[in-house]
Amino acid sequence: MSRTMSDGSEDFNGNISRTGSHRQTDHHGYKVRFPPAKGLFTELAEGVKETFFANDPLREYKDQPRSKKLWLSLAHLFPVLDWARSYTFGMFKGDFVAGLTIASLCIPQCCRYAFADSSFVPPLIYAAMGTSRDIAIGPAAVLSLLLGTLLQEEIDPVKNPYEYSRLAFTATFFAGVTQAMLGFFRLGFIIEFLSHAAIVGFMAGAAITIGLQQLKGFLGIAKFTKKSDIISVMESVWGNVHHGCNWQTILIGASFLAFLLTTKYIAKKNKKLFWVSAIAPLISVIISTFCVFITRADKQGVAIVKDIKQGINPPSFHLIYWTGPYLVKGFRIGVVAGMVGLTEAIAIGRTFAALKDYQIDGNKEMLALGTMNIVGSMTSCYVGTGSMSRSAVNYMAGCKTAISNVVMAIVVMLTLLLVTPLFKYTPNAILASIIINAVVSLVDYETAYLIWKVDKMDFMALLGAFFGVVFASVEYGLLIAVAISLGKILLQVTRPRTALLGNLPRTTIYTNVEQYPEATKVPGVMIVRVDSAIYFTNSNYVKERILRWLRDEEEQQQEQKLSKTEFLIVELSPVTDIDTSGIHALEELLKALEKRKIQLILANPGPAVIQKLRSAKFTELIGDDKIFLSVDDAVKKFAPKSALNV
């Protein structure tokens, strides 16, 4: 997006140079100034501050007594101490309703997942340390798939359930350590390498993979592949079709899936009826469980949950692998799962924060997520993060603060302690239907289409993540997405955009002639703009591209018998920085132009650029009289007749 400058013009994103929008704008009397010289340590300190402390977190500590600083430190670590002081009963009513609503979504998952504690221990930690008011913490479909896939590659959960659980706790511990360290050292910018497009593709691929995995319970298949790629899953499904499927299981799964999708459609059409979709999973579990118990359909081949452990799991600190080969494997899995969980949670938090017009602190979020997973690994929990579906329900239910997570945690805990045995006859098909219904919304085809229209390279990252997850594995999908995203960055860095500028009639604005065909070129003057910093990665390309513009211009002049180019003006306002390679490229450009008897002129260099050009003595080489505050000033000086015509 372009942003309006103080002089009425727009920046380079709007393709209008910073020269003023009215004819009477006059820069005469002003020259390009050199910023105050800075020492090495000053520059390093400023660089570190902008990289790691961009939001200036220490500003509120200035001129405060020691007791106040201590309180601010505690509030920084536990934000609940800050907002709890203004908490009201009215806010609690909203949080209470929202907490009960999202608990109704969590309870069916407690029947499905072995580590049900993940739905009440991590939310309690996050409520004290997190900064998002809307995010619902607990197990998430995508992260559960990722963790399950990576763990099953190392240990068979059926043959070795004890070792499998130990590795899961180990991975959860290191996921938490990874997240907490990123927050402590303020390295949150690392997760930005996973672009929005890559996340959309990854989520869609994971949704399809998760849905296919549920065919085992949905169709009543006894022997099912442990692989997650679509080819292996479909081979497994096709191989079992010949042996027949349990029709009662299919009937239960299909009928309740239709019910869940219908309630979701109703909630989507009428936002006030969001609660219909929210309580539908719990109603489905209750009704299907009752029907199976009355008809004893489990005797007819309908697979049920059977044994569900009642109560809260014991501490698991002693189960974490602290030595041996599984320590390294747990660390590797934990780092991957931690990064994915972090990316998902912060993306969800930012989404709802924007809707309610408040800010979340990325580094505090990392500390909160990391701490809750470290504690969770010691209390029989696996990696938790923000759930998009539950967060959306939490938002629609009218949550005010993170207390809704506390309410949800208490309800889930009471369920585990008191009523878990009642879900013994819950059919696996209904749990599969609930998960399929949940992941359907993760396939965001509208956003995918928008990405295709806006940026084709972003769409390639989306496709890479999608096909990588669907046809290979979650790990490969992430690697492909990150590789394509980095490739896009490298392409933009090494091949920055350049543009020929022309004058808009009756103005002093010089803009891209491709975007504004009515913009006219100045006779005898070629004006070029470089839309990027000039570094060693692109300096040679920038030089060659400008010379190519010049050769094309000379050929056109010969064909049309126009006056030859005498001046080359390089508009530098978009160039935020330059290194020694960039300066060397300008020196080579200057030599090439001197051979053609063309003068090089620089327009509007920024403070960092002009400072480095002076330090390298390039300003002496080109001459101070060849550096101008604007393109218009340069044209008035070297092509006054053309300037008078505007």
Image: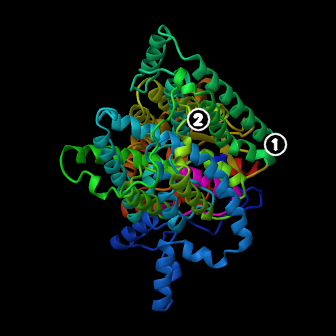
Which mark is first along the chain, 1 or 2?
A: 1
Q: Does the magenta stretch include residue 341?
A: no
Across and down, in percent, residue 434 comes to 60, 35
Across and down, in percent, residue 310 comes to 47, 50
Q: Distance between the residues labelled 2 and 1?
A: 21 Å
Q: Which residue is drawn at 72% across and 65% down?
A: 93
Element type at marker 2? helix
Q: Can residue 554 be seen in this view?
A: no
Q: Can residue 130 be seen in this view?
A: yes
What residue is shown with label 2? 439
Q: Which residue is drawn at 57% across and 32% down?
A: 553
Q: Find the residue positioned furthest to the left.
A: 324
- Amino acid type, residue under disc 1 in the picture: Asn
Res 270 label: 1
Q: Residue at x 53, y 26 (%)?
A: 298
Depth check: give the residue in front, 105 or 145: 105
Number of numbered markers: 2
Res 340 label: none
Q: Which stretch appears magenta?
A: 345-363
Q: Residue at x 40, y 22 (%)?
A: 225
Q: Tell me the quarter of the picture where residue 52 sits.
A: bottom left
Q: Does the magenta stretch include residue 359?
A: yes
Across and down, in percent, residue 320 comes to 28, 53
- Neighbor class of circle 1 (other Cα within 10 Å; few <14, some 14-19, many 20+) is few
